[in-house]
Amino acid sequence: MLVRIVRMTFKEADLAEFHAIFDRSKHHIRAFPGNRHLELLRDPGHPNVRMTYSLWESVDSLVAYRQSELFRTTWAATKPLFAERAIAFSGEKMEEINLDIQVSKIT
């Protein structure tokens, strides 16, 4: 599983336009083959920053999305709204920790 986080800083006047673009594309992105999860986050300390958090089956599925017409048109509409260059991070999930077992007290 590949985790992808994209941090985007927008011009204040363009936030509403970004949200409109995201609303139009979010279900298509989520339905894209290989996408397992999609979230939109807001940085609580920076009101013009939004982040997408997505889970992909593999690097290949993310690459296929990034080469798709959906990505090209969405990114082309989004990029001019940036106040700063976007920053993207990817990581392969190594372990997920759940609390589905009894946790003993650590002394």
Image (spheres, helix red, strand yellow):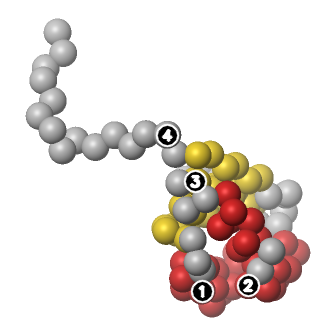
Amino acid of disc 2: Leu
Crowd around label 4: few <14 · some 14–19 · many ≥20 (10 Å)? few
Front position in the image: 46 or 95: 95
Mark 3–mark 1 contact, CB under 8 Å? Answer: no
> Which residue in the protein does label 4 denote?
94
What number is the disc on residue 3?
3
- Mark closest to the chain's N terminus, 4 or 3: 3
> Which residue in the protein does label 2 denote?
70
- Mark closest to the chain's N terminus, 3 or 1: 3
Of discs 2 and 4, which sits in the foreground?
Answer: 4
What number is the disc on residue 80?
none
> Which residue in the protein does label 1 denote?
28
- Mark closest to the chain's N terminus, 2 or 1: 1
**Residue that sits furthest to the top in the current view:** 107
Of discs 1 and 4, which sits in the foreground?
Answer: 4
Q: Position of residue 23 (x, y in %)?
A: 59, 85
Q: Secondary structure at mark 3?
A: strand
Q: CA distance from mark 2 to mark 1?
A: 8 Å
